[in-house]
């Protein structure tokens, strides 16, 4: 069976994922949140974003389940924004976009390099990996319908 890209676009997750994220400011807010920024004022001063735009983008990220707005433990009158599991799972995509930008001249790692906390060594480039860990190129990939995917052999501990 061949893959019908035009038909698949109706069900593709990419357009809805991009719609959830919004635009440039949403990505920069996510970058800030992944770096530990939690408060409206911190986002505003770090990014230099207008307050109305910041409020709008944070509300959109909360509405889409990427961040959660919650009262601070120490002062219930103040709120903080935290990434949900859904938001945390955007980290590999964000890192891949940054690495792409660094490679293709959109920016260079002059000040900060993302490193392994334990070894203090720069992380590897994000790569597409097969189920067994092999690194794949675009030429190694094919589109399959869900019912065409070969089931993985169960490991003895998982067999029923």
Image (cartoon, rainbow, N blue to C red):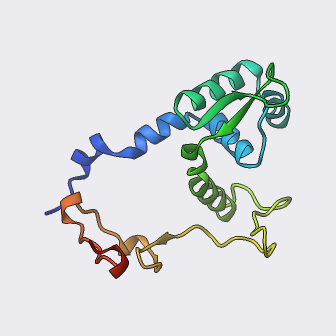
Up-down relation of residue 90 to residue 24 (above or below): below
Please tell me which residue lies in front, 120 or 97: 120
> What is the residue that sits farthest to the left in this orientation?
1
Please tell me which residue lies in front, 78 or 52: 78
> Residue, x 17% and y 62% (percent of image)?
2
Q: Quadrant of the N terminus?
A: bottom left
In the image, taking residue 42 as reference, residue 15 lies left or right, namely: left
Up-down relation of residue 155 to residue 60 (above or below): below
> Residue, x 62% and y 70% (percent of image)?
125
Q: Quadrant of the C terminus?
A: bottom left
> Residue, x 37% and y 77% (percent of image)?
157
> Residue, x 59% and y 29% (percent of image)?
62
Please tell me which residue lies in front, 49 or 73: 73
| Whether residue 154 can be seen here | yes
Q: x, y (%) of residue 43?
A: 78, 33
Quarter of image, res 14: top left
Quarter of image, res 109: bottom right
In the image, taking residue 63 as reference, residue 147 lies left or right, namely: left
Q: x, y (%) of residue 86?
A: 54, 44
Q: x, y (%) of residue 127?
A: 53, 70
Up-down relation of residue 4 to residue 154 (above or below): above
């Amino acid at each position: 069976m061949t893959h019908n890209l035009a038909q698949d676009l109706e069900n593709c997750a990419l357009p809805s994922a991009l719609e959830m994220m919004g635009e440039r400011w949403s990505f920069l807010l996510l970058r800030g949140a992944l770096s530990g920024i939690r408060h409206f004022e911190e986002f505003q001063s770090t990014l230099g974003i207008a307050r109305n735009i910041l409020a709008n983008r944070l509300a959109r990220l909360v509405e889409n389940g990427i961040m959660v707005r919650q009262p601070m433990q120490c002062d219930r009158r103040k709120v903080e924004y935290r990434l949900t599991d859904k938001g945390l799972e955007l980290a590999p995509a964000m890192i891949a976009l940054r690495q792409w930008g660094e490679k293709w001249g959109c920016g260079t790692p002059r000040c900060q390099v993302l490193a392994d906390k334990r070894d203090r060594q720069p992380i590897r480039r994000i790569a597409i990996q097969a189920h067994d860990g092999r690194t794949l190129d675009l030429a190694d990939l094919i589109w399959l319908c869900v019912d065409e995917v070969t089931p993985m052999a169960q490991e003895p501990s998982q067999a029923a």
